[in-house]
């Protein structure tokens, strides 16, 4: 009787051992296309980290290996169509102006400069910063435009989106002293196309 029980226990243990081995081996054997991927041989640049076989790039870099600067592809001259969406002066609503704006690099990969904002050459070196959550979004630094203070022109808020098809859209909220020496708030929509 004891030998039958021992034989049964050994058989059950053997079957359990076989099941555990099969589960372990099948969980470690992966075919291409299954999660997770291996990071062996994956080299990420500019502080990127490999996760599941792909590089996760820090803000300011993109591409397969994080080798491309996000801002780099937007450096250059752009044709701007600027529309007044809202204003304290109703006569300005829906008016449009066109001008050329230049995007320049800064010392970091997460910021860039705008030159000739609102078709004013003294409105230059306006800093924009890439969003850390959505790398194609950016915001304007409202304190960087010290030269605007002397013209009684203020950027209250501004943000935009960089599209992959060489276009940028922006919305900027400004406060300015108008010709009647009254403060006026304007909401501007900017559409940028590469020249």
Image (tube, rainbow, N blue to C red):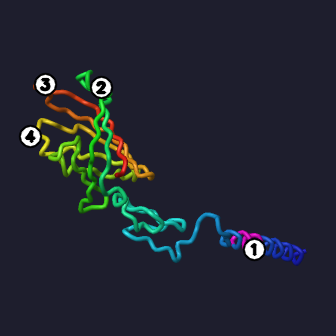
Q: Position of residue 95 (x, y in %)?
A: 30, 29
Q: Is residue 23 magenta?
A: yes
Q: Are marks 3 and 4 in contact (CB under 8 Å)?
A: no
Quarter that holds the N terminus: bottom right
Badge 2 is on which residue?
93
Helix, strand or loop at disc 4?
helix
Q: Which mark is residue 150?
A: 4
| Vertical side of 147 occupied by 106: above or below | below
Chief secondary structure of the magenta portion: helix
Q: CA distance from mark 1 to mark 3?
A: 85 Å
Classify residue 127 as left or right of residue 195: left
Residue position marked by numbered label 3 in the rendering: 182
Q: Is residue 93 left or right of residue 154?
A: right
Which circle's residue, 2 or 3, is located before the other in the chain? Answer: 2
What numbered label is drawn on residue 17?
A: 1
Q: Which residues are magenta?
A: 19-24
């Amino acid at each position: 009787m004891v030998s039958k029980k021992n034989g049964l226990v050994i058989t059950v243990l053997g079957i359990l051992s076989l099941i555990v081995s099969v589960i372990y081996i099948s969980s470690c054997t992966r075919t291409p296309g299954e999660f997770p991927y291996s990071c062996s041989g994956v080299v990420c640049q500019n502080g990127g980290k490999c996760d599941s076989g792909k590089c996760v790039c820090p803000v300011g870099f993109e591409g397969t290996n994080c080798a491309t600067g996000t801002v780099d592809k937007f450096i250059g001259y752009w044709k701007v169509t600027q529309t007044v969406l809202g204003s304290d002066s109703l006569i300005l609503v829906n008016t449009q102006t066109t001008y050329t704006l230049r995007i320049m690099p800064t010392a970091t990969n997460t910021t860039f400069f705008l030159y000739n904002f609102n078709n004013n050459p003294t409105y230059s070196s306006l800093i924009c910063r890439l969003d850390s959550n959505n790398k194609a979004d950016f915001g304007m630094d409202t304190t960087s435009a010290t030269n605007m203070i002397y013209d009684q022109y203020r950027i209250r808020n501004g943000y935009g989106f960089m599209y992959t098809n060489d276009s940028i859209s922006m919305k900027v909220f400004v406060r300015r002293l108008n010709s009647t020496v009254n403060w006026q708030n304007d909401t501007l929509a900017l559409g940028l196309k590469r020249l």
